[in-house]
Every structure is written in structure tokens, then in C-alpha cells.
Image (cartoon, helix red, strand yellow):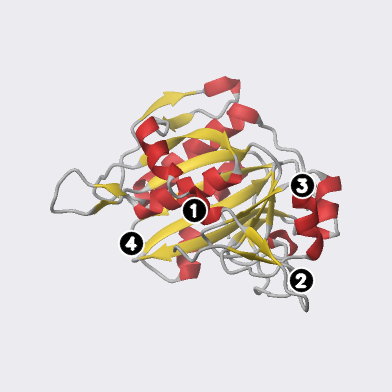
Amino acid sequence: MTAQASPSVQPATAVRWIQHCRLDGVWQMAIDAWLLEGQPATEPAAAVLLAPAFRLYRWSRPTLSLGWHQRRLEPHWSDLARQGRLALVRRPSGGRAVLHGGDLTYALVWPRPLGTRSEVYAQALGWLLEAFAAMGQPLRSGRQAASLQRSSCFATSTVADLVHANGAKRVGSAQLWRGGHLLQHGSIQLDPCPALWREVFGGDPPELDPLPLGGHALEDHLYRSAARWLGPLLGGSVGAVDLDHGGDGHAGHLPGLVPLGPEVLAAITQHLGRFQPTLSVNGETSPELTMPRAT
């Protein structure tokens, strides 16, 4: 897969470009789910107002996120959690375990995309192809078939993932579909901790070259690419100004980012328990993570 021209502009709708935040895993997953489920509409005739949305975020502590249907754990994961080495959280999307902390995560809400799952993945990942090509580190889609035998998301690469020419996996993504609407989110690995990665997965993290941008400069660069690519794809106006933020040399349209307000955060608080896993142990098998089937 290579970077392509941005898709044609469709009728404009309001895209929610959400400001970067650093929170724990339960909060991050609850926010992503809230974006997909919509917010109460102001008009009585409409029960839910769902708008396309995009955000980048980081994790406040090392966290292992489990796919919604990943019921089995490696036995030592629960030990690491009890020791306070990492937190455990359940993602609303599918896939396998992802170790967060040395990464940057994205979330995209896309109302009623058209095409097969593979086609939608290809379109939804175009902004990352463009952004990494501009940094001199091109990516392509993974080419391995999905396997249920590996517990780590980064142990294999499928069309849902992006890898470098040497096969090192940079981005792992997963989806949740509801009512024809899509939540796609993924982990962009930047500087994973080798020691913790080996403790969790029993092997080394992907061998990734350092990026030429970091911190706010990297986030701004990624937001610009997302606005250029996803804005037209989602049928929304960018609502941006021309900036060369932080001296990174990548001028472009930085969308107007808005924080999540107190009312939104109060509404999300009611759903935090949906993504907080609890441990249950079966004497004949490894521990399992259970939680209410709320979605």
C-alpha cells in the first residue's frame, strides 16, 4: 500500500477534531466508545447525534489493552497487574493485546463508511501513510493472515496494520462496527520499553527507527495529515489555519482542536465500569478477563 491522493470532497458536515489528552486506559476507552455512540440530540425528533470524529491521545501509565473478544490471558499478565507494573483495560474493539505507554494512539469515528472491511481499513489508514512518507519513513499494509495463536497484536501484521520495508510493525489497528458506523483506533508505536515488552510478551518489541519529530511537533504533523486526508473522506470541513507549528518544517492545515468539556466528561464517567476488567480464574485454564457485555 502506498500513499494516495486525498479522496474527493463530499458535502460538508461537522467533524469533531478532539484535543490530545493523557488519561488512564479506562477513560480513553470510554471516550472512544462515547464518540461512536453519539450524544443526545438537541432536537426531540432525533435520539442520537453522531458526527465523524478524530483524536490522538497518550496513556498516563503503562497499560495492556485487551480486544473485546480476547477472553484468555497469559497467566503472568494478572501478576504484573497486581504488582502495579501495568494496568489492564478492555477495548471496545477487537484484536489482541497491545502494550501502551511508549506509543501514541488514534481514534476515528466514521459514520456509515462504504466498502468491505479491507477497503475501509485502507481508506482509514491513508493519513498515516501520508504522514510517515513525509517523515521519510514510508509504511505499507501488513501481509500476514490473522492468527488466533498469538496473544500480542504486534506479533503479526495484517491489512489492518502498517509496517516498514523491513517488516517492523509501526501501527496496529482494530475496529468496532455498530449500526453501520465505525470506530477504528490503533496504536502508533514510538519508543516501546524493551524490558516491559519482554516481561509481557516474552520477546522483543518491533525494531523501529526513531522518528524525526516528537512530542507536540509529531502530534501536530499527524493532525495535519488526518485533516487533509480524513476531512474530505468524512465529508467534513477542516476548519483549520495554515501553520508551521513548533518549527517542524511540515506546514499544512492544523484543524481547530477542541477539548472534551465538563458536561461530556461527566456523561462518560457513568460508563467507565464497562471497560474495567475483573479477573476470574478457572482451575483448568489460564485466568480470564470478564466484564459486562454492555456493547
Q: Nearer the viewer, mark 1 or mark 4?
A: 4
Q: Is residue 290 visible?
A: yes
The mark that comes first in sequence, 1 or 4, is 1
Local crowd size for mark 2, using a 10 Å CA cut-off: few (<14), some (14–19), many (≥20) = some
Q: Nearer the viewer, mark 2 or mark 3?
A: 2
Residue beneath label 4, please? 112
The mark that comes first in sequence, 4 or 3, is 4
Residue 4's disc is 1
Q: Which three-letter amino acid code belongs to the residue tagged 1?
A: Gln
Q: Is residue 270 left or right of residue 167?
A: left
Q: Which three-letter amino acid code belongs to the residue tagged 4?
A: Arg
**Separation (CA) of disc 2 from disc 1:** 45 Å
The mark that comes first in sequence, 1 or 3, is 1
To which quarter of the image does residue 71 belong? Answer: bottom right
The mark that comes first in sequence, 2 or 1, is 1
Residue beneath label 3, please? 208
**Separation (CA) of disc 2 from disc 4:** 38 Å
**Separation (CA) of disc 1 from disc 4:** 22 Å
Q: Which three-letter amino acid code belongs to the residue tagged 2?
A: Ser
Question: SS of the residue at dot 3?
Answer: loop
Give residue 103's position: percent from left, percent from top: 67, 43
Residue 286's disc is 2
To which quarter of the image does residue 227 belong? Answer: top left
The mark that comes first in sequence, 2 or 3, is 3
Q: Which three-letter amino acid code belongs to the residue tagged 3?
A: Leu
Cβ atoms at labels 1 and 3 below 8 Å apart: no
Residue 113's disc is none
The residue at the point 44 percent across, 52 percent down is: 33
Q: Quadrant of the N terminus?
A: bottom right
Local crowd size for mark 1, using a 10 Å CA cut-off: few (<14), some (14–19), many (≥20) = few
